[in-house]
Image: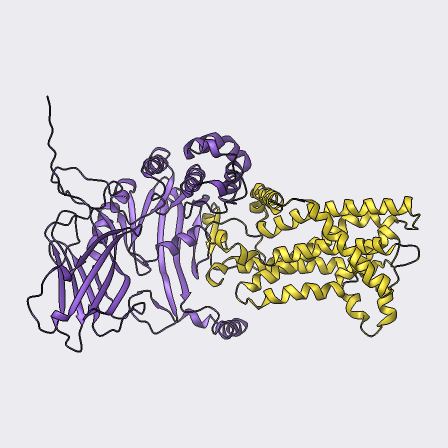
Chain colours: A purple, B yellow
Amino acid sequence: MMKDIILKAENISKQYRLGLVGTGTISHDLNRWWHKVRGKDDPFLKVGEVNDRSIKGESDYVWALKDINFEVKHGEVLGIIGKNGAGKSTLLKILSRVTSPTTGEIKTKGRIASLLEVGTGFHPEMTGRENIYLNGAILGMTKAEIRSKIDEIIDFSGCERYIDTPVKRYSSGMTVRLAFAVAAHLEPDILVVDEVLAVGDAEFQKKAIGKMQDISKGEGRTVLFVSHNMAAVKSLCTRAIVLENGETTFNGGVEAAIDYYLQGSKNDFSIIDFKDRKGNGLVKLKTVNVFGFNEDCKPQTGKPFTLRFELENNHGVSCDDIDFDIRIDDNMGQRISWLSTRLFSKTNNGSLQKIDFIMDNLQLNYGVYYVTTYLTVKKIESDWIQNAFSFEVEEGDYYGKGAFVSSIQSKALLNFKVNTHVD
Amino acid sequence: MTTPKDAPWLYTISSKHKLIDLNFKEIWRYRDLLLLFVKRDVVTLYKQTILGPLWYVIQPLFTSVIFTLIFNNLANIPTGKGVPAFLFNLAGITLWNYFKECLTGTSNTFTKNQNIFGKVYFPRVIMPMSIVVSNLLKFGIQLVVFIGFYIFYVFANNATVTPNSNLILLPLIIVMMALLGLGFGMIISSMTTKYRDLTFLVQFGVQLLMYGSAVMYPLSYFEEKLPEYSWLVECNPIAIVIETFRNMTLGVDAFYVDKFIYALVFSILIFLFGLIVFNKTEKSFIDTV
């Protein structure tokens, strides 16, 4: 059924150069040019390593994507899932033609539009209405198309009162609403959606998610959906591919893909090679292991949860002298929690090797959380890493009532009782 | 290399580039965007200024006055029999300004728009094209000012300026200036994505180029005074265009068909070369910029 396939990616690879562009570029460019003149291959295409950001590499070149193959059928909603840095954004950039692949090609039978970033090209001096036209045209609509939808767009944005006022007078929330309203009314054959749902206030988010569901379900549009939110992927997509370090490791039904992703993504991090850390380094963090019920299990809301840290303690610093804090932020950078060994008196005084933070029932709702670690030896900063690692919590039935709480409503789940009083 | 089976693909995103990969159909589809960019440029340029579009007029007038004082009154450069020096300078500056605005406007296309280019795709060439078109409006206003002064000098001062039949070439001359500015601008903008040195070169290079483009002197006078360097100016297509413009409007300077054709061919070639370089760069500049 060749006819059904609307988009086809063949051997897509993308190579990036690490470090500063500019140092040595001219020599590499000349070298490339010299190979080209003699009809040989680009010498730098042979080098390049698998893109694992936590491991120190040998080469300046890495493959952000390597030999990606997939097909999308007409009307299909394909999920693309993977950890941070797995290559999702690079793939989206290639799909939306912002950059071109190093090798391989993507063939398409329809126009692709992306909701990568909303509000691109807004000009602060122009009015909301003028910006709708400009932004719509940038996203690929014609003037006539926009004219026929302008009332709908203004209505959706909820900025009617300000529509003939320059955008520079808008609140930031209003700007985002207006921008999303334009993007949501695009009608391309293939829509690429990155996690843009996290904009605006709760009321607008509901509207935005509803619109996304309309687009993908009601209107039968072909959609590529990129997300960390497994619940959203599960409800919207029919098929999914899993990216890992720039390679497709799974391609199939959405349930199986999510299962594969959850098992495959080990929450083990080696952070000893991290450069971006502060402190005197007397005691340093070596590895982190995040797990749920047991060591092979991903953390889930309402289930047991452990954060295990191994330390590099070459000087045998005693347990008494070490204080260790972890700060947990949500994906919006909002501080959710602070946990510290300071709150407890230490019972042993040997050379400290390992610290576990244990919770009996995890009170974090589903989503991605970022952890900053802070370690002191005798109150002096020894190892401080901003956003050292992130972990993902799976949806779970915290209250045991079969009802899930949206993470938009609540990041942390509290224990409570309801007493009702009636006359 | 399309086999019949592949034929229905709308387009292909690939690493291989054809030398000239111009999709005119696509550019045409985005014509509304071009017009909206022009509108944006024109509407927003003089927002929150008191004089507004009057600045379009003030710039060339003041420059012409200064040029007349320095080059004609002080340095005694002749402008031809009966031709007012001010009008001579205004003619040169009006046309030169169009070239300059096109060049400087397009020469930072990639670096200035990296935010928007990094997020959505549209034919990148729309951006420099919109700059050339919006500058055309500015040029139009300045041309009207020139015509105003022209009429004033002819009727009030009885200046002996006579336009000749070459005037029908005027649209072609404007197109040549646009092609030159756009062509050079696109080349420079492509190269600045990797090597920022060129931004500095443009800033003072344009200044120097003006002196080599017969803006404030007739080419014949240059030949007379500095015969050993005159080939530099004679080879400069911009100088030829400006000379032609003064020839058709004021009746001064000479018009040579061979030189004119040379300038025409040169501007078309530089434009095409610019397009090729630009197209090559747009595919992946976002990784290097």
Q: Is residue A47 left or right of residue B151?
A: left
What percent of the width, then of the height, locates residue A191? 40, 43
Q: Is residue A245 visible?
A: yes
Q: Residue furthest top?
A: A423
Q: Residue furthest front?
A: A379
What percent of the width, then of the height, locates residue B160? 93, 51
Between residue B18 and residue A83, name the one nearer to us.
Answer: A83
Q: Is residue A234 left or right of residue A182?
A: left
| Image quadrant where residue A62 sits | bottom left
Above/below status of A323 relative to A396: below
Between residue B177 and residue A197, name the one nearer to us.
Answer: A197
Q: Is residue B3 visible?
A: no
Report the residue at 76% width, 63% height from top.
Answer: B213
Above/below status of A409 relative to B208: above
Q: Residue furthest bottom?
A: A315
Between residue A27 and residue A48, name the one nearer to us.
Answer: A27
| Image quadrant where residue A78 sits | top left
Between residue A284 and residue A335, name the one nearer to us.
Answer: A335
What percent of the width, then of the height, locates residue B221? 87, 66
What percent of the width, then of the height, locates residue A373? 23, 62
Report the residue at 50% width, 57% height from top.
Answer: B283
Above/below status of A285 relative to B116: below
Q: Is residue A359 left or right of residue B81?
A: left
Q: Is residue A246 left or right of residue A130?
A: left
Above/below status of A314 relative to B83: below
